[in-house]
Image (spheres, coloured by chain):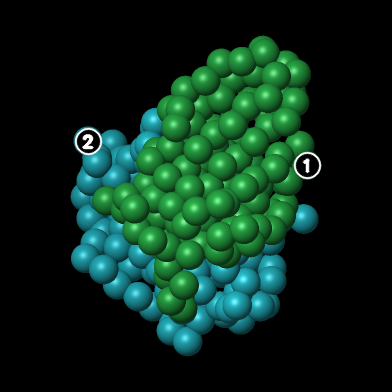
Amino acid sequence: DAGITQSPRHKVTETGTPVTLRCHQTENHRYMYWYRQDPGHGLRLIHYSYGVKDTDKGEVSDGYSVSRSKTEDFLLTLESATSSQTSVYFCAIRSDRDNQPQHFGDGTRLSIL
Amino acid sequence: DQQVKQNSPSLSVQEGRISILNCDYTNSMFDYFLWYKKYPAEGPTFLISISSIKDKNEDGRFTVFLNKSAKHLSLHIVPSQPGDSAVYFCAASASGTYKYIFGTGTRLKVLA
């Protein structure tokens, strides 16, 4: 299994509060990604990183920010959580060789009441 | 606009028979395609991939076929086993982008 750890695995919080999800890898891979999974939508890319301090937006980035200060850690922050951000969040990593698959963590189930 | 589509939300197959999962894409720049399997409460697991220079890739019971002219790929599982019951996602990527676009998934149920 790829060395990816997501924390927390479950979180319940209230609307308007800030939330930070952490993704930690031990593979020293350059690329890291945050997705959300919702019924009927599959996996949608929120943000991704192509190196330390290098990040870019995905298809559903509104309301989310990310930071990557070390190769091994990629943080996803909801500055002011809304009920529409209730979802399962997955982190993924991949190497920078051509035509490589992503490898996913086990997810964080986030509920915003 | 969905660039990767899985039009069948669910599929049921008898154990030992063939499972065929389908995926269509619209972006002609995609040149690398993948299939993932996902069990409940776990992350997606990479299953098999294919580059656009090939039209078939096989790994044990799993074969992926790519029809570039139709912008269509399929995953064949032969023979199907109850442990194959999961949600299957197809994904596509274009060279140099390092981003992957996923379909909405197909839930496969293999009946014993």
**Percent position (x, y) of residue B99?**
60, 64
Marks 2 & 1, CB-CB < 8 Å contact:
no
Chain given the colour green: A
Chain given the colour cyan: B
Which label sits on residue A62? 1
Tell which tag, 2 or 1, sits nearer the viewer.
1
Which label sits on residue B34? none
Residue farthest toward the front in the current orientation of the protein: A69
* Amino acid bearing label 2: Ala
Residue B84 seen in the figure = yes
Q: Is residue A98 left or right of residue A18?
A: left
* Amino acid bearing label 1: Asp
**Percent position (x, y) of residue A13?**
61, 15
Q: Which residue is mark 2?
A: B112
**Disc 1 is attached to a residue of which chain?**
A
What is the secondary structure assignment of the residue under circle 2? loop
* Crowd rating for badge 1 (residues with CA inside 10 Å; few <14, some 14–19, many 20+): few
Q: Is residue B70 left or right of residue B105?
A: right
- Distance between the alpha carbons at the discs numbered 2 and 1: 44 Å
Q: Say which residue appears at 51% left-offset and 27% top-offset.
A: A109
Considering the image in quadrants, where does the C terminus of chain B appear? top left
**Percent position (x, y) of residue B45?**
36, 50
Tell which of A82 and B107 is nearer to you: A82
Considering the image in quadrants, where does the N terminus of chain B appear? bottom right
